[in-house]
Amino acid sequence: MIKLMEGIPINSNKIAYLQQVKQQNMAAILKQIWKYEQVSRVELVDHTSLTSGTITNLTHELIELRVIREYASVSGNVGRKRVLLGFDPDYYRILGLDIGRSTFEITVTDLCGRILKTVGREIADQQGPDVYFREIEPVLAEIKEQIEQAGHQILGLGVGVPGPIDYGKGALLNPPNFPGWGGFELQQTLNERFQLLTLIEDDARTSALAERWYGIGRNVEDLVFITMGIGIGGGVISKGEIVRGTNGLCGQVGHMTIVMEGKVCDCGNRGCWEPIGSIPGILSRWSEGSTMDAFKAAVDRGEPEALKCLEDTLIYLETALINVFNLYDPELVVLGGRLFPYLAPSISSVQSRLQSRLYAFAKDRLRLEPSTFGASQSAVGATALLFRYLLNEPVKLLIER
Amino acid sequence: MIKLMEGIPINSNKIAYLQQVKQQNMAAILKQIWKYEQVSRVELVDHTSLTSGTITNLTHELIELRVIREYASVSGNVGRKRVLLGFDPDYYRILGLDIGRSTFEITVTDLCGRILKTVGREIADQQGPDVYFREIEPVLAEIKEQIEQAGHQILGLGVGVPGPIDYGKGALLNPPNFPGWGGFELQQTLNERFQLLTLIEDDARTSALAERWYGIGRNVEDLVFITMGIGIGGGVISKGEIVRGTNGLCGQVGHMTIVMEGKVCDCGNRGCWEPIGSIPGILSRWSEGSTMDAFKAAVDRGEPEALKCLEDTLIYLETALINVFNLYDPELVVLGGRLFPYLAPSISSVQSRLQSRLYAFAKDRLRLEPSTFGASQSAVGATALLFRYLLNEPVKLLIER
């Protein structure tokens, strides 16, 4: 809240107030650097409407903090060097952890959004937190130690998990097909064991954040990420920000009804997309159902039943996507997850069928894209939880902690 | 953008900058008054974190502008009078106009959100702007004159129309079943003819705004308004604000696919809710299809075919609502439109069937409510377009114009 209309207040809140102004100004600078990747101080004055004095002082402080650095650039016309500012990739590191129903993955990124390391492991199905922690703990501890020994500073640990999430407690609500995790206070447990600032989020939302902050969603205000694998989930970004909804359920695209009066789903609804359109859904509808690779081989051989099963899967996807477009009206829909590679060869035909079903004036604007980070999508997006925090509240994250 | 960290800038932007700070502070005060309806200056200091000096000066100015006024209140314990601030209902008026496919309605509200006048007329189906303007113009001109002769000031004219809308041009894009309106620049035409600040919005969104600003959505951040009549539309409010989406199509709930591989709809999609769940949809599925009153009489008499048709309608509604809850996760869904009164007796059974289909942890939070303003919903919400403008940009609306 700005209260300077009547002059700067001189009460005891003044310092807190000035910190808040600094926070907003620093955030404005960092967001412009993120947006343009490299930008001069003069351009920052134009883009932020901050004075050049403020820009000089705050960028100096951010350089000292090793969040940004100067880059020399040779300008095109006269060959004169310009100094540009960009994120400093050398000091800070962000850790990302994705916990899946039968995998985990750990990612390390720098402030330029580059992936420096990824470590993934399979875990037997249906395991609870104890089994996961036994596997994760030594890997994460070793990565943390390596980073710190190399003289880097870790901003924090972002975590993607199957939702829905109790954000107040930092715990998983009862996720379907993931026994033992309901109520487990993951955020606090990780925070205590690794002594890192820890943020958790639904894995479909971390996947959406990966696109928003590092991927093809960088310049997109409204996008929906749909992850298809064992389950089907959605992450909705509107006006540049994640939308969680009232109960953390916004974007539960896997649980929209596709088949009216269809079978009862684990979520309680009937005829959901997830139980028919996910990997288990495909394998249950295919009489030879064993693995997706076997399914793909059967499709490639032209076996009629497998082809029919694929076609049905695409019709379910098409129907779900029409609803996603007509309800959210996003600029971009990104498809990912372990099922996606098997459907990828058919996506251009899905796109043209979708176009024929959209409002005529909007159909040429339809954008349907594959995910940028493949199997690492959620872990990369988990690091974006911390990067977003840095860009929104740099003073709180870097100075006040 | 705040640029006071380094002291108040002394360049030529200073006045514009101070106006911007004033705008933000005045907006903060007005929003608190709206939220609490009546509030003391001391409470305003608490709620806004503005200094008491700023509160005193700005509320004084708002009283002079006749936007707010003082109300005396007897406090409970000691009987001492407190002075409270609330909106002043005596000076400003807002006009709302709803243009429907066979009706128009004009509403007058004051700044307390009270409806002072409504005038509605039927118009023959399928008429273009000329026929509408012939009817609307004398009514609106007379209302405007009456208001001005009584010494009131009109803030502006809000308009609800069938979407989708080209917001840049203030024109209707080709709305289905509304020939002659595609491309018509309604906003500019009204603005020129009546010399009033004119804002236009999709009628499902004005309906949602009516709840958000004056109705049961006042304290709700996330709500969806569904209007069912000749068409079916949705207005989505997320984090307190209307969401339009990339093409102005966010909330096109009538065009989600309910019947997979169903009939082609005017919008281009197949199996949409609107052509089966709207008034024309019901009358087309009922073999005696004539009017909704005849349908209601047949239901009341217990005619099996009419009962089956009603039950199917409710199943479509239930399926659509499950998708609305699982995709948007709103705190509240409000149902309105000309069809709603015919379905109202069945809504409690729809609500309990919905609860059985939602995620168990969220089902008790489900809220499904009838619209507050009935047939006047969109016209009342159209006035909220101006009220929202007043609360967001009071300096621009009241002083700079």
Image (cartoon, coloured by chain):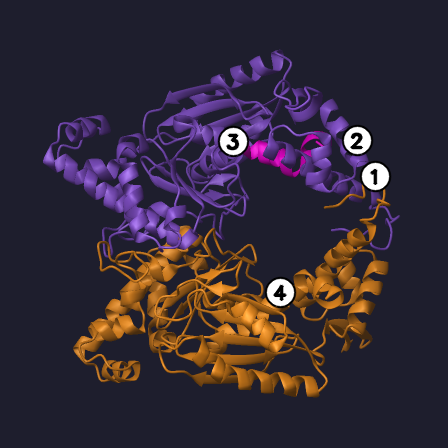
Chain colours: A purple, B orange
Query: Callout 2: helix, strand or loop?
Result: helix
Q: Which residue is mark 3?
A: A214
For the point 37% across and 65% down, the residue is B351
**Looking at the image, residue B289 lies above or below residue A168:** below
Mark nearer the N terminus (3 vs 2): 2
Q: Position of residue B45 (x, y in %)?
A: 78, 59
Q: Is residue B296 magenta?
A: no
Q: Real-space Cα distance between discs 1 and 2?
A: 9 Å
Do the residues at pointers 4 and 3 share their chain?
no
Res. B360 visible in picture: yes
Q: Which residue is mark 4?
A: B388
Q: Amino acid at mark 3?
A: Tyr
For the point 83% across and 59% down, the residue is B54
Q: Which residues are magenta?
A: A382-401
Nearer to the camera, A177 or A118: A118
Q: Amino acid at mark 1?
A: Glu
Do the residues at pointers 4 and 1 share their chain?
yes
Do the residues at pointers 4 and 2 share their chain?
no
Q: Amino acid at mark 4?
A: Arg
Residue B6 has which mark? 1
Query: Callout 3: helix, strand or loop?
Result: helix
For the point 26% across and 84% down, the residue is B294
Query: Callout 4: helix, strand or loop?
Result: helix
The reply to whether dot 1 and dot 2 touch (C-beta < 8 Å) is yes
Q: Position of residue B272 (x, y in %)?
A: 29, 60
Q: Real-space Cα distance between discs 4 and 1?
A: 33 Å
Nearer to the camera, A165 or A33: A33
**Looking at the image, residue B211 lies above or below residue A152:** below
Q: Position of residue A298 (x, y in %)?
A: 15, 29
Image quadrant of residue A50?
Answer: top right
Quadrant containing the C terminus of chain A is top right
